[in-house]
Amino acid sequence: MTSFASKVFCRVEKVCVHLPVFLNTFLVFSITGEVSYLVVVEAPLEADQKKTVWSSWWKVVHLLAQYFMLGNICWNALLFLRTNPSIKGVFLGGEGMGQGWRYCYTCETHTPPRCSHCYDCKVCILRRDHHCVFFGQCVGFRNYRYFLCCLLFMWSGLLYATVMNAEVFIVILKEGVTVHSVLLLLVPWIMLVSGQVSARAFAFAFIADTCVVGFLLVSAFFFFHLFLLFRGQTTREWYSSRRPYSLGLLGNLRHTLGLCWYLCWLSPLIPSPLPGDGIHFEVTGSLEPAR
Ligand SMILES: [Zn+2]
Ligand SMILES: [Zn+2]
């Protein structure tokens, strides 16, 4: 009975860990589908509200841009999940342990500087930044590039989708700022369940809302990580106000995104080898916290 209960618990835990990934995938594909619909069929505007009619080639340009961003989001996310950021299978070296090395009692091994244990992944992560709950995996030395590029394309994609959805807001607010239109924008689920709006109106309002909220959320994450990238810091080092491994703007870009940092963000398929090994780091500042 106990083993059955523990098996069920393990299954539920596995589903819960992967739930954010399924939810994000669903949202990304729903938004892309809706924006493609807006481009192909054109926005649900009435004839007198339409200022221009898009030509076929202009629609193709829009669709290509959308699928370029979608492809980059999915590919970077896949490589992020498939790249192991942990110390598993990495030869850490038995000698030469110096400043910054620690002992992890859970993994029962000495770990290099900037490495720390993740209690969700249950392993030590090289140059650990944080555990990303949306992916259910840690952001570390080897997968940081894919994480940042995924954020970049999510940010640009949501900015584009928000601009494209401006017409949906125009349609909803066409009747003026009434209780009905405001409730449809703020709580579309309640309006659908209470039978106040059609499923089509709900879908447009829900996706338009998701674009705006998602854009604000992703903007905060993206600009914070750009700030950390330029400063050569991890989130943990930022908390303790330490910047001992900063190599200057160019050095930080090369050590985080790889030797081909100026091109690699265009596609995850562009090779960009990392100059370091995730174990040894050049110390350029004080290892003591600044405050
Ligand atoms: Zn550990
Ligand atoms: Zn983790």
Image (tube, grey):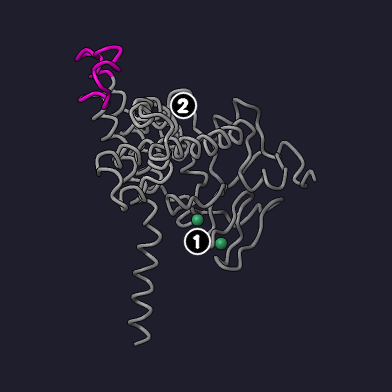
Q: Which mark is residue 260?
A: 2
Q: Say which residue label 1 marks.
A: 120
Q: Residue at x 27, y 34 (%)?
A: 34
Total numbered circles: 2
Q: Are marks 2 and 1 in contact (CB under 8 Å)?
A: no
Tell me which segment is drawn in magenta.
41-61
Dot 1 beta carbon under 8 Å from ligand 2:
yes
Q: Residues within 10 Å of mark 1 (few under 14, many from 20)?
A: few
Left or right of residue 115: residue 274: left
Q: Is residue 129 visible?
A: yes
- Real-space Cα separation, disc 2 to disc 1, in angstroms: 32 Å
- The reply to whether the residue tagged 2 has its Cβ within 8 angstroms of ligand 2 is no
Query: Vertically, is 19 above or below 263?
Result: below
Query: Residue 273 occupies which quadrant of the picture?
Result: top left
* Left or right relative to 216: residue 239: right
* Residue 272 in view of the camera: no
